[in-house]
Image (cartoon, helix red, strand yellow):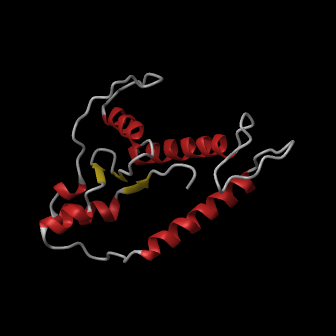
Amino acid sequence: LPRLVISAALGIATFLSWRLLLWSPATGQGGDLAPRAEEGFTLTLDTFIHVQQLRKKRLRAFCSRSGKVTTLPRSQEERARLLSSLRASSKLDLLYCQVPSTGVEEWQQFLEKLEKENVTLPVPLPYPRRHTPEAQLSEFNLTEIEAMLGSYTKVLFVRDPF
């Protein structure tokens, strides 16, 4: 159930944020994959899906340039280097990549709040944020890492322009 709630929340938040980012009438500007401003333009689901497909295609092309890792290295040092930017939430069954300058800090704060039981989220979330070490994936043993990679929901936060 927590996995379903997180997936639904991430999906809705992503759709709404992309809808706002794709078309901003105040500036008439968008990212390099956003539709150009036209008078009377309305964002449709087809336009949104097309832009998402273009972004996925670009992401796949980027990922295919680097070698695919099919097995984890046996040495702890190599695993730590390879998995250094991946964070794990055991309670939410979630893995996410901590990419700098993508607003991941706000998502981390949101996920920390979700991990607490019976919490009502204040809007907006208060700052300054409490800095606690997140659980890096490399801190787990090899068996746990393989189980997490096989079963957890994986999320990569990006920002526009992509």
Q: Residue at x 61, y 46 (%)?
A: 18
Q: Is residue 120 above or below residue 32?
A: above
Q: Quadrant of the C terminus?
A: bottom right
Q: Nearer the viewer, residue 32 or 51?
A: 32
Outermost right residue = 40
The image shows residue 141 at horizontal and vertical percentages of 15, 61
Q: Is residue 77 above or below residue 22?
A: below
Q: Residue at x 29, y 44 (%)?
A: 91
Q: Is residue 92 above or below residue 25?
A: below
The image shows residue 124 at horizontal and vertical percentages of 47, 24
Q: Quadrant of residue 2?
A: top left
The image shows residue 121 at horizontal and vertical percentages of 42, 25
Q: Nearer the viewer, residue 144 or 80?
A: 80
Q: Residue at x 26, y 76 (%)?
A: 71
In screen coordinates, is 50 left or right of 73?
right
Q: Quadrant of the N terminus?
A: top left
Q: Residue at x 32, y 36 (%)?
A: 112
Q: Is residue 124 above or below residue 145?
A: above
The image shows residue 96 at horizontal and vertical percentages of 36, 52
Q: How many marks?
A: 0
